[in-house]
Image (spheres, coloured by chain):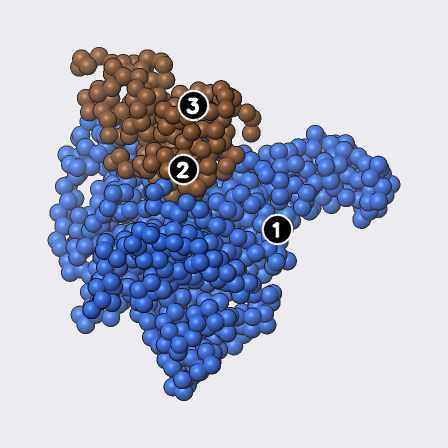
Chain colours: A brown, B blue
Amino acid sequence: MIVGQPLQLRVNGTVHDIELEEPDVLLIDAIRSGCGLTGTKLGCGTGDCGACTVLIDGMPANSCLVYAVEVVDSEIETVEGVAATSLGAALVDRIVVADALQCGFCTPGIVVTASALLRSVQGSAIDDAAVRCALAGNLCRCTGYAPIVAAVLATAEVAIAGPARGATGS
Amino acid sequence: MNSTRAKAIRRDARVRATGEVRYTDDIVVDGMLYGVLVRSPIAAGRIVSIETAAAASSPGVVCVLTAADITDRCFGNYVKDQPILARDQVRFVGDPLAMVAATSQSSARRAAALVEVVLDPLPYVVDLALAADGPRMVCVHAGEDNEVELVTIQRGDPAGAIATAHTTTTTRITTQRAHQAYLEPRAALAIPTGSGLSIIMSTQQPFGVRTAIAELFGLPESSVDVQVPAIGGGFGGKLHLGLAPHAAAMALATGRPVQVVCSREEDMATANPRENSIIELTTAIDADGIIRARRADIILDAGAYATDTPVLASMAAFFATGPYSIDNVDVRARAIYTNTCPTGSFRGPGGTQMVHAVETHLDEVADAIGLDRGELRRRNFIRRGQRGLTGELMVAETSIEECMDIVLQRLDEYRTSSDPTDGRVRGYGFACAWWSTLGTPSAATIEMHDDATITLSTGATEIGSGAVSMGLPLIVADVLGVEPDAISLRSGATNGAPFDSGSRGSRTMFAAGNACVLAAEEIARQLKEEASLLLEVAPADLVLTHGRVEVVGSPTVTLPLSEVAASAKGRSGPLVASARYRAELVPLEGSTLHNVRFRALGEPTFHCHGVEIAIDTETGRIEVCRYIAVHEVGRIVNPVGARGQVEGGVVQGIGYALTEHLETNDRGEIRNPNFVDYRIPTILDVPPVIETVFVESNASPRGPLGAKGLGEPPILLVAPAIGAALRDALGRIPNQLPFDPASVRAIVEGASR
C-alpha cells in the first residue's frame, strides 16, 4: 500500500478502490463502508461471534480481526458473493425452509462459514459433528442451533446428489 | 384453520439469510454524524469539571455536549430518575458524562478520549445485600432510600399456618446478572425533521420510544416517529430507551442526523442485563404433603437507575408460588439501587430466577418430608376453580399435570436407555412453571384492495420470532379465507401503523393477533354485507373461503373476493377496518396487594421441562445430554416458529444455568464484557436434540385461533431442571447460579467428605 493512494481490494470478483482514512482500517470496515456491502455484520469486534465471517482465499476468517492492507493480494468473498453461488443459494434455500434463523444477524456469517465447509467436502458425506465443529465459532442467540445443522446437512445431501439448484422464490 | 397449519415460509427469512436486510448500523443517511459517549470510570463521584475544548477542536468534531447543554429532564418508565448525561454526580461505572458527534466514527472516538473529566470520588455500594439492609447505608441517590420499589402480596394467615405446620423448610438462593447477548449491539439513529425527530432504532417498543423522546425533548408525540429496521435480537434488552436520547440530543444540537452504535464491550458493560437477586423462600407443609403456606423475601438489584425494575419486582413477587395452590401467602419483593449498571428486562423478566428458586425449594421440601418430587407437585398443583396468590380465579383447566406426566414418562425412558461408559455421573431432573400472556394494548388496520389483495398495518414489532412476519398474516388469512401470500404487511414504523405495546411479555401473537382478528372480522362483515346484496342471500348464510365468498350449503353459488371488494367500494365505500384490543382486567379476590403492578396471569400457560445431564466429577463440568420441553400455550398457530421459540429459549436457559454470569467487581466494573469471558452457548454446548411437545388440549377462548403466548416460557425451566438433575446425581446443589465447574466441584468435594 502506498500512502495517499486508494487501496485495491478484490471482493466477490470485483476490484474496489477504497480510500483509507488511516492505515489501520479493518477489513470489515473496508467491506461495509468502503465497498458498501453491509451483509457482513459486526457483532463483537473481537473475533468471538463470527457474524463478520468472510472468505479470504476460500478460508473463513473474522473480518473484524484482519487489517484491510493485509489482504490486498487476496480474493475476498462476502455473504453477498457466497449467496450468489449455486451452493450458497442452495444453502440459503434450506435455511429458509428449516426456519434456521430468527433475528438473522448471525446468519450471513453462518452462510459463509458453512459454505466453506460444504465446498471443502463437496461430493462426500458429512455428519452432524463436522457441521458443529465448523460452526463452533459462529454464535447464534436465537435458534438453539438445531435447524442450522439440519439446513447445512440438507444442503450437503443436495450437493452430493447433483449440481445445486439456484434459489427458488419464497 | 384452513391455512394456518400449512408449512408457511417466513416472508423475511431470505433477505435476512443473504444479508440484504438492513439493521440500524447498516443505514447511512446524507450528512450523518457518528456519536460516541464519554462514560464514568468510577462507580460514584461528584463531577468537578468536564473540559471539552480539546475534544471540540479535534478534526471532524461537530459538537461536544455535557449535561449543561441539554434538557435536565430525566427518563424512566416507572421512576423518572435517569438523566441523559450525568449532572453533578455519576452513579455507576459507565454513567454517560458527555458525548461527541463527528463526521466519522474514528474521529468521534478520538475526540471522546480528549474530553477531560475530573471526578471527586464518593462512597459507593455495589453489594446488593449491603445496599438493601447494610448497617451503614450508602445512598445511591443522595438523600433517598435505596429502595426503588416495595411490593407485597398477602393472602390467608401465613404466620398461623407456619406456626402450626408439620414441617417448615427454608431455601436461600442467589442468582447472577445475565446479559441478553443479542448479536446486534444496541444502535440508534436520530434525524431532525424540522418539526421534530425521526428515530431509526433497533427497539422492541417503538411506540414507547416515541412517547419517551417526545416527553424528554418537549415535542408533540405526533412530530416524533420511530422506525424499526431489522432487529438483531433483543430478548428484553431493547425494550429500554437505550441510546435514543443521546442520538436525539446530538441531532437536535447539530441539526444533522446522528447515529450512535455501541461496541460489544460498551453494550455488555452499560446496557440493562437481567438483575441479580437474593431470594429466600419458606414453605410450611402438612404431613400428607399439602403445602399450607409460602413466605418469600426477594431482593432485586436495580443498579443505579430504576428502568424496568419496579415492574420486575412485581413479577418476581407474583412468581413466588408457581403453579401450586397455596392458601396462605406472604411475599415481599424489593428493587434496590446499587452503584452498578442499571438492570432491566430479559426474557421471562423477574420470573426466571423465581422459577429456579421455587422449583429448587420444592425439591428441598419434598426431600425434607420424604415425598417423591413429582408426587409433591401433583398434590399441590393449582386446579380449575382455585385462586392464585393474588386472588385470580383459574377459569379454565390447568394443564400442568398433563405436562409433567409427559416429562416424567420421558425421563423414565432416558434413565433406562442410558448406558454411561464414559465415567461421568448421570442425573435426571425436571421443573414446572406457569406463565402469562400479556394482553396489553394493540391496534391494527386492514384494507382489502380491488384485486382482493390485503394490506395489514400493525404497530407490532418483528423481534425475530416470526410472530409478526409470519404469525399475524396467518391469523388474518384464516379469518378472511385467503392465502397468507395475499397479505402485504406494513409494520415497524410508528407513522405507518396504529399503536402497539411492543415485543414483550409473550404478547405479540396474542394481543396484536387479537387486534388483527377484530379488524379482519370487520372486513369479513363488510364483504358479506356486499356479497349478500350481489347474491341475494342473507349475510349469515355466507362464508369466506379459498379467496371467494360462498353460500353455505351451495358451494357453486360463489363470487371471487375481488368482485365483491370492487363492488363494495363503488356502492358503500372501500373495504377498510381498524380495531383495537386490550385484554379485560382480571377480577381479583381475597388477597391484600401493595404496589403490585403485575396482578394476574390473564391467560395462564403451563410448562414442564426434563433433562438428562452428565457430570464430570473431576472437573465439575456439566453436559446437557437429552432434553424434553413440554408447553401448553393453547393452539399452535405456526408450528415451525413455535418450535424455534422453544429451542432458542432452552439454549439461552442452558447458558443461564451453566455459564452466563455478568460479573461486577468490587469497584463496580464489569469484569467480563465480551463473548470470551461471558460465555453464551456455542453450537458445541447444546444437546443434539431438544424434544419439543405442545399440549394443545386447552385452546384459549380469547386467543386468536386459540393461541396463547410462548416467547418467554422456554427459558424459565432450564436452570431448575438442570439443578434437579444435579441433585438427583449428587444429593445437593449449589445455592447460587450459574452451576459453573467450581461450584459443582465444591459440591462433589463436600459430598465426599
Give the label, 3 or 1, closer to the camera: 3
Can you give x and y, in whole percent of width and height, for residue A107 in the image?
Answer: 41, 34
Q: Earlier in the sequence, mark 2 or mark 3?
A: 3
Point 39% across, 69% down: residue: B363
Q: Which mark is residue A128?
A: 2
Can you give x and y, in whole percent of width and height, for residue B178 in the image?
Answer: 31, 52
Can you give x and y, in whole percent of width and height, for residue B145 in the image?
Answer: 27, 67
Q: Secondary structure at mark 1?
A: helix
Q: How many angstroms separate mark 3 from mark 1 (CA)? A: 47 Å
Point 53% across, 39% down: residue: B469
Q: How many angstroms separate mark 2 from mark 3 (CA)? A: 16 Å
Q: Is residue B106 left or right of residue B12?
A: left
The residue type indicated by label 1 comes to: Pro
Q: How many angstroms separate mark 2 from mark 1 (CA)? A: 38 Å
Is residue B166 shown above or below B507?
below
- Residue behind mark 1: B704
B266 or B216: which is nearer to us?
Answer: B266
Point 45% across, 49% down: residue: B690
Please, which chain is the residue tagged with disc 1 on? B
